[in-house]
Amino acid sequence: MSSLFIIIRPTGSLFAQCDHYSPNVTIIHPKEPLFTQRNHYSPYGKKNNQIKIIQSYFRSNYFMVFTYYGHSCFAATHQGITILFDPFISGNSLAKSINIDEIHADYIFLSHGHADHVLDAEGIALRTGAKVVCSYEIHEWLNEKGVSNTHPMNTGGRWNFGLFNAKCVVAQHSSGLPDGSYGGNPMGFIITFNDYCFYFSGDTALTLDMQLIPKWAKLNTAILPIGDNFTMGYEDAIVAADFIQCNQIIGAHFDTFGYIKIDHDQVRSAFLSTGKQIKLPAIGEQFDL
Ligand SMILES: [Zn+2]
């Protein structure tokens, strides 16, 4: 019985290398379309599903894989861990294509208590058993609802969760919970793995506090609100990108309601003109940066 060896090549040419390996070796490039690899490299076509699973696993080992669920809800998967941010799906008419029951999470981070950020946190936490990281006040609110796997934090604090650590940073916003309870401070999070670091700002205005972030982290990418009205708009987000010294931005908190509809072309060209990249993901889109 032959064994299956997997070689991952995140960069470089597969074509030049493949001849050097025996027929028992399957070369999987995490970003190549699977069928191309099967046709050209793999003697294990029948094991396509198995290879696909392995490919997906290794892809998230090399890259930070983001999935956008609409509004400010993202999943970030890396090194086998999925962190879900601000789940608001069932109340988002634009996110009808998303099946909440299929969303996996090991951790759920909540930036603040507003319904458009916590609406589906309780349901997903109870189904998945994910640990919910949030303000102390939201942690108590969730505990009363029977969500007991929670971790309270507050701005300024950092905690090591094992494969990554999270630092809570200031967000300029408000944070009442849907039933009128006090939600504590709104906050953003800097998530640091050993090889990748990103900032999820939560709902916030542009604030000088963002200038502190480069003292704590060298960011690979940042998720910033750009919808204006309730948070900063795209022009302030461009300034925020300078403050946090990160030119690779993912837009959030746009288009969901009439107040925050944006002109995508205008936003893209404004970022481009300053040498920065803005990703405006489609709902359900999975991508890595
Ligand atoms: Zn919001």
Image (tube, rainbow, N blue to C red):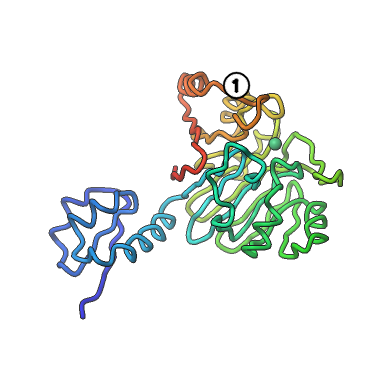
Left or right of 16 in this view: 84? right
Residue 169, position as x, y percentages in the image? 70, 43
Q: Going by the picture, which residue comes out furthest to the left?
A: 19
Front position in the image: 126 or 109: 126
Left or right of 142 in this view: 4? left
Q: Residues within 10 Å of mark 1 (few under 14, many from 20)?
A: some
Establish if 267 lies above or below 70. Answer: above
Establish if 117 lies above or below 224. Answer: below
Establish if 60 lies above or below 209. Answer: below
Establish if 258 lies above or below 150. Answer: above
Front position in the image: 160 or 250: 250
Would you name the residue on which mark 1 appears? 235
Q: Going by the picture, which residue comes out furthest to the right?
A: 181
Q: Secondary structure at mark 1?
A: helix
Quadrant of the rendering where the N terminus is positioned: bottom left
Which amino acid type corresponds to the residue marked 1 in the rendered image?
Answer: Glu
In the image, ligand 1 is in what quadrant? top right
Residue 254, position as x, y percentages in the image? 60, 30
x 53%, y 42%: residue: 219
**Rendering quarter of residue 208:** top right
x 44%, y 42%: residue: 289
**Rendering quarter of residue 237:** top right
x 73%, y 47%: residue: 156
Residue 132, position as x, y percentages in the image? 69, 57
Left or right of 173 in this view: 215? left
x 57%, y 45%: residue: 74
